[in-house]
Image: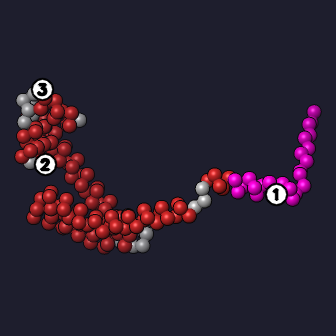
Amino acid sequence: MFGNTAMFIELFGNGGVVAAANADTTMALFKTIELMNTNSWVVTVMAGICTIMLVTYFVTSADSATLVVCTLISMGDSEPLARYRVFWSVAIGAVASTLLLTGGLAALQTATIVAALPFSFILIMAIYDLFKSLLEEPIPGQLLKAAAVASDAELLTRRPKVAVATVSL
């Protein structure tokens, strides 16, 4: 909704959203709300609602990340101990806060790439093993042909069954 509104304001209104986004990406949403030509109390309420929704999104995402980490540490237990959840939520929050305060979004993006790089090698090995396994599997056409040969041999060695139909009046 706000993306289309920002485009409309930029194309047909007073503009200013692009300049605000170029200056500070995080302010684009709030500049869009400000430029909607509404009363000041409506702008305040909308900005408050957006802030609450953003905080809820980040808290929910952090909670999900904490649950995944704790489940892995607890060897698949779907309800890990509370002390693990508290520790990992504080640790993840501290790392994210430190990265944002020291270098902003660029530092957070760099840390994400650096952390994901070793995992990419694991994915490459998994893809290699998948292709190796697929090459070892028989081709579906060969499976059907082998099944047909087996069923022909079975038909030759066993006696046919006679079907009997009964009709009741």
Provide the secondary structure element on which disc 2 rests.
Answer: helix
Q: Position of residue 8 (x, y in %)?
A: 16, 30
The answer to whether 22 appears left or right of 139 in the picture is: left
- Residue 137 visible somewhere in the drawing: yes
Q: CA distance from mark 3 to mark 1?
A: 78 Å
Which residue sits at x=17%, y=47%? 51
Q: Which residues are magenta?
A: 145-169
Which image quadrant: the C terminus? top right
Q: Is residue 107 above or below residue 12?
A: below
Q: Which amino acid lies under the numbered mark 1 shown in the image of this protein?
A: Glu
Specify few, some or many for label 3: CA neighbours under 10 Å numbering under 14, 14-19, or 20 or more: few
Which residue sits at x=34%, y=67%? 121
Report the residue marked by disc 2: 26
In the rendering, which numbered label is found on residue 154? 1
Which residue sits at x=33%, y=64%? 120
In the rendering, which numbered label is found on residue 12? 3
Q: CA distance from mark 1 to mark 2?
A: 72 Å
The answer to whether 74 appears left or right of 136 in the picture is: left
Seen from the viewer's position, the closer of residues 159 and 26 is: 159
Which is more N-terminal, label 3 or label 2? 3
Q: Which color mode does the image show?
A: secondary structure
Q: Position of residue 115 (x, y in %)?
A: 26, 66
